[in-house]
Amino acid sequence: MSAYHPLTESEAIDYARSLPDLFQPDSELTSREIGDGNLNLVFHISEPSTGKSIILKQALPYAKVVGESWPLTLDRARIESEALMIQESLCPDLVPHVYAYEPDLALTVMQDLSDHIIMRRGLIERNKYPLFAGHIGTFLARTLFYTSDLGMNQQEKKERVKRFINPELCKITEDLIFDDPYTDSPNNNVPPAIRDAVAAVWQDTGLHLEVAILREKFLTHAQALLHGDLHTGSIFIKPDSTKVIDPEFAYYGPMGFDIGAVFANLLLNFAAQEGWGEDEASRQDFRSYLTGTIRDVWETFEREFRELWDRHGTDRIAKTPGYQDWYMREVLRDTFGFTGSKMVRRVHGLAQVADINQIQDEAAKERAQRLALAIGTSLIKLNRQASSIGEMIEIAEKAVK
Amino acid sequence: MSAYHPLTESEAIDYARSLPDLFQPDSELTSREIGDGNLNLVFHISEPSTGKSIILKQALPYAKVVGESWPLTLDRARIESEALMIQESLCPDLVPHVYAYEPDLALTVMQDLSDHIIMRRGLIERNKYPLFAGHIGTFLARTLFYTSDLGMNQQEKKERVKRFINPELCKITEDLIFDDPYTDSPNNNVPPAIRDAVAAVWQDTGLHLEVAILREKFLTHAQALLHGDLHTGSIFIKPDSTKVIDPEFAYYGPMGFDIGAVFANLLLNFAAQEGWGEDEASRQDFRSYLTGTIRDVWETFEREFRELWDRHGTDRIAKTPGYQDWYMREVLRDTFGFTGSKMVRRVHGLAQVADINQIQDEAAKERAQRLALAIGTSLIKLNRQASSIGEMIEIAEKAVK
């Protein structure tokens, strides 16, 4: 079974049975393939006699998006499993446990999270998750601090940068986030109703300059080991638990890119409230929950990051007066820019979000799309001048007034 | 001969003889070991019957500086030879030709440049090199542009970043340039006469903040493949030829670090003129030559870099209005900061420069040291506000008034 091939369900069961200390010897195991088949096979293996279950995730050597298929490196399974293990060492409760990784098969064996739901789905159902802000703020503070030059030996960090060079997955981001949305690219998926607003984005050279600068940071600023794709579809959640999954886009990049991914997806849901509220009061209430969450995430992140820095900063220079304030301000500014970029691409780019696209009322969907574009472009334009998280919330609130 | 061991002269000759197409079969070869034995063995192999000669440079597994010895990776020989070959492909006339590289022996076979002299020596002798500014400006423009995301495929660039992860050599820079000079470190070599000025550097928290930010860029900003140690001791020169050597510190970092290395060493010589002039007029004349060279290097670099960008920019986004101007301004600002950092470390850090240290007159040496510190710290403090190369020259000129 060692040469790479996509596993059958019975091979998946055999493989699961071979793992030490997981299942009873000779007990019956069942498998259900629950992946969408676009990027990975995902086998849910369970042992009915004990109720135990695990996930086998196997990378496929191609990606399928909107009917297109292109080859995609299997090395992403290594990157994903190594990133998960680093994240688990830093935030044991906030990622699925990895039981094993099988390089030849591009196969990761991990904790079953079937009792959680995908957060995007939860937000569309207007669930509130009061613990989420604390959880994800801690995840961001710890994973970003301890993988940066501030929190780890700087020579070991360089070796880690090397292990997480991830050209193929980064290329997807570079194209779909920083390139296509700002030009009339065939990769876009422009909703006809907002073609005028999209055309304005294509014409806005001031906006393009900011996006070019943000892309430069994405390409060159090896600041911390990022998750790389931290949207609400990469978060499993239930009221008392948050689990960040799928770090196959992990690479060394600017911290604000991960923080911005979280905020962008909260703000996309904020915009999508146009289509989900039965009444204005409930819409406002959920929007307040979302902006409050953004504030809490940032404040948790900033407080914990600064605490880690003060207590566990790697060296003397990290304690230079003024350096921490300068650093946090730069991370905030990047966060504004990447939040905006990650919103814009979800309105008329290749891959969009269910929060908006599942709105049934076409007029409401159009309002949501225009709102998301307006908020996203405003954040991008402000980014290099941003000075507090309050400004992000203000931009969002003003846009719905 | 394949397992690593330091070569004897007769082994060096045998090895040279085994190279194809260099020497006559069976002709007599002679060897002279001309390295300083601190980092590398350097064999000058010549064939008296034809006058042909080559250099065999073999890395030693340790570094010796000021009597101390510590282990140092042999991988630097690979990095040096690969960097030389990339540079040669971009600027064939501006680096020594590499005939062969023998990984097991950490051995590079390269063009003999004995008809050139080390530029630092040339400047101490007050030679002027009118072609130098054009040569080094071109070297900087071409090597930095074509190894950056602007001038090469961005996915191939990531693979190249990986090949040039260079932790041990970067560590030397991180310690000796960005750390020790700003604190009372045992690695410093403080000239007693200027202890007051050095103590002021150790107290200056505004300066420390700028240095911490510059170090952050050195640690994280994977902008282009740098030479990494581009001082005037790494340049072989004669009136009609400039050859950049010894890129063992090569890694992906901020462009301004290489440009700043050139300027810092020109300005160290500028400061050292205190000790070399017989008369004020000749001192002023050579200083004008040096500042004029700085201006010409920057202008050549900027003009050629912009031309390459306009003609050979990798993608659509590189053409975004305003992006090139923003980028060049950032490179200029980094250049100010790194120029200053590379001056300060040469005044009271571990490794100093002959331009200043060989001054016989103690009072003149002290004036030169104070001047270099004053110019260096001013450049560091200005760096994030710099707007033209003229400001660098102004700072230097004001310091001697």
Image (cartoon, coloured by chain):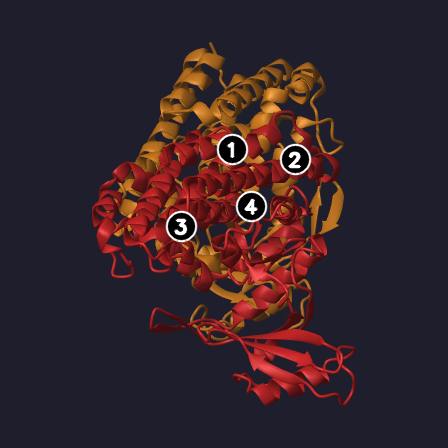
Chain colours: A red, B orange
- Spatial distance from mark 1 to mark 3, Cα to Cα? 33 Å
Earlier in the chain: of badge 2 and badge 1, it is 2
Residue located 47% across and 43% down the image: A282
Residue to which mark 3 is pinned: B148
Earlier in the chain: of badge 4 and badge 2, it is 4
Residue to which mark 1 is pinned: A389
Residue to which mark 4 is pinned: A223
- Spatial distance from mark 2 to mark 1, Cα to Cα? 13 Å
- Spatial distance from mark 4 to mark 3, Cα to Cα? 18 Å
Mark 2 and mark 1 on one chain: yes
Task: Give the class, few, some or many, for how many residues have Cα within 10 Å of label 2's Cα (few <14, many ≥20).
Answer: some
Front residue (pair A384, B215):
A384
Name the subunit of mark 4.
Answer: A
Compared to residue A183, the image places residue B185 above or below, namely: above
Earlier in the chain: of badge 4 and badge 1, it is 4
Residue to which mark 2 is pinned: A303
Q: Percent from the top left, x then y, of residue A139?
A: 63, 49
Residue B239 seen by the camera: no
Q: Quadrant of residue B3?
A: bottom right
Q: Secondary structure at mark 2?
A: helix
The label on residue B84 is none
Amino acid, disc 3: Ser
Mark 4 and mark 1 on one chain: yes
Q: Percent from the top left, x then y, of residue A249?
A: 51, 60
Amino acid, disc 1: Ile
Residue most toward the front? Answer: A279
Compared to residue A130, the image places residue B355 above or below, namely: above
